[in-house]
Image (cartoon, helix red, strand yellow):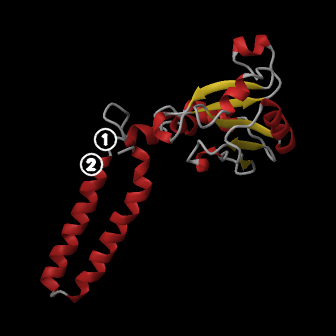
Amino acid sequence: PQAFWARYTLLLAGVGLAIAAVATDDLPRRWRRTLDVALVVLALGSVWHASSGFTVDGPSLADIAALPEAEREAAYGIDLDERPWSDARARVGHGEAFAYDPSFNLPGRLFPAHQHGRVVYLEAPGPTADELVELVEREHIESIVLGDGPHFTGAEAARSRPDRFRELAPCAPSLGDPCVIFAVGTFTTDDDENGQN
């Protein structure tokens, strides 16, 4: 299982422990106390087990917590490389947008930390380059995730306009269909070689 699946399963463990704690009220005092202590030990054991980190070779939770916020955000991501996502979100200012098409399944990770940007859904799986340019101008899009495969041709359309779209990184295969993160702007050949705006 992928590390991000914990958001679906941790809630169940917490609810289960709470229900078990409440259910002990009907037990005799001696059994109730024993079971309550066992639940606390179980919870602490789970935290201890998780403290080694999210991945086998990754940093521990204590090491991640000790990092400055910017480094902590980049230390771990859903696809094990958070930097391109962080860079793409940083491009989105107040009133601007991060867009995505149907190839991408986790739009919640597109919202910038300041929460004043927008996320725009692009319904068409195969927009033309001209449609993409019109969309980014109309919606003030600064970053976009586009599908890159037989069913989604947005990335191909964006690549045909290097003056407006610069490829930042591919999405991880675990995030759904193949897709690519693009920066949006007005680029020259020099910008593309230097990886700038």
**Residue 78 in sight:** no
Identify the image quadrant of the N terminus.
Answer: top left
Above or below: residue 194 compared with residue 91: above
Q: Is residue 78 above or below residue 164?
A: below
Question: In the rendering, which numbered label is found on residue 118?
Answer: none
Is residue 102 visible in the rendered structure shown here? yes
Q: Is residue 27 above or below residue 108?
A: below
The residue under the point 62% across, 45% down is 102
Does residue 99 appear left or right of residue 33 in this picture? right
Q: Nearer the viewer, residue 32 or 117?
A: 117
Q: Provide the residue designation for mark 1.
A: 52
Q: Quadrant of residue 186?
A: top right
Q: Secondary structure at mark 1?
A: loop
In percent of width and height, residue 111 lies at: 66, 47
Q: Which residue is mark 2?
A: 49
Q: Are marks 2 and 1 in contact (CB under 8 Å)?
A: yes
* Residue found at x 35% / y 41%: 53
Q: Position of residue 51 (x, y in %)?
A: 32, 45
